[in-house]
Amino acid sequence: MGNDIPIGEVLHLIEKEADREALRQGKKRQENVWERREPDYLPILISQTMPERSGLPSYDLKQQFFDPQKMLYEQLWLALGSLRTKTDAVPSVRVNFGVGFLASVFGLNQEVFPDKMPWLRRHLSMRKIAKMSLDDFEPVSEKGLLPAFRRYLNVYQNYLKDSPVRIYLPDTQGPFDSAHLVMGDSIFGEFHRNPQSILHLLSLTSHVYRESTFLLKSLIGEPLNEGYHSCNLRMSHCGVRCCEDSTTLLSPKLAELTIPDLRNAIGSFHSWIHFCGDGRHILKLFLSLREVEGINLGNPEKHDWETTMKEIIAARKVYYGEAYRRENESLSEYFKRILSPLE
């Protein structure tokens, strides 16, 4: 397996493109931002497509899910795309089992598709969840997709021993996102009817997030409070990403009930928070937490740019993400608008 997958060709292209000094500078600029030191300029992280892909094989998401070499091969093209731009991006790859990675620790299996990421079709009943305790997740290293992660990681590490490409964590959804995946959409009605039952589930998902992350980081070989992400990001004083997409569907009152378990999940690492959609009603909650170091908006166009950036700056957090460009906005107008919230 893997003999006909041209991983070596992509690694050769990566080695030809790698400018070790530029990578060092980009890493330092990113660290300066995370550590609240002013860099010589704000890091810019972009990517590009690779013309060399023409004529070489490609593998769909289902093929990747069941073959670590195919998964790594496709991830390496993304890393090369970040490297070739000669921006401040630090290329990285991950074992990508989809958003259900932590939900698998609860004994749930994802359905795997060739044209879209894996998804959970089945969920646990509230009755079954109520009977679960923290002891059910020990040892976490043997639960769900964790053993598969170890096998895939070994393949990645063997190929990347001398490469500038780093390895980052698999898709670890935050406590409420994972609870939503485990229980399904009935979680929203149940949260109104019986909030204590959902708080029990959150105590389980926050435990799984924390303990799995301890294990994953030790296997990758990175400190608790730093790391890499998203094929371009270097994190310092911040060790994880936490997804809170489902939390945007809660009222502010219910969202506030999830915060203790969120803090329990990320407290040992510190985190940047991602959410898609319109999360203006919960943004202040996240900005108030000392364990949260940054924000990533999946849909920045849904937020007033100047107001939101000033809120993030006032909270002494980092914004990592896209800065959308308006239709017919000139490049100079774009940069003036994007930079206007800065002192």
Image: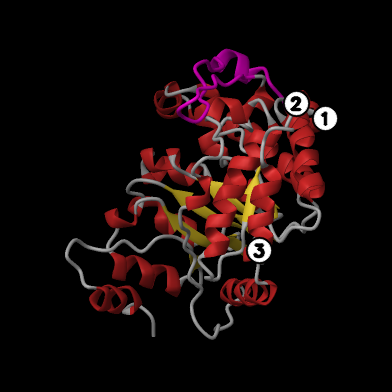
Q: Which of the labelled discs sits on residue 16, or is there none?
A: 3
Q: Considering depth in this image, is 249 or 66 the residue closer to the camera?
A: 66
Residue 119 vertical placement versus 218 (above, below) = above
Q: Amino acid at mark 3?
A: Lys
In space, the residues marked 1 and 3 are separated at their CA atoms by 43 Å
User: Does 251 sit above or below residue 78?
Assistant: above
Is 126 contained in the magenta span? Answer: yes
Quadrant of the drawing holding the N terminus: top right
Q: Give the x, y percent position of residue 118.
A: 53, 27
Which residue is pictured at 37% across the width and 38% down the height?
A: 249
Q: Is residue 246 visible?
A: yes
Q: Quadrant of residue 322?
A: bottom left
For residue 264, say whether it is visible.
no
Residue flagged by tag 2: what amino acid is it?
Lys
Q: Which mark is residue 139?
A: 1
Residue 215 inside the magenta-drawn segment: no
Residue 54: percent from left, percent from top: 49, 43
What is the magenta range?
Answer: 108-133
Q: Which mark is residue 143?
A: 2
Q: How many residues crowd mark 1 within 10 Å: few (<14), some (14–19), many (20+)?
A: few
Between the residue at mark 2 and the residue at mark 3, the CA separation in whole angstroms equals 40 Å
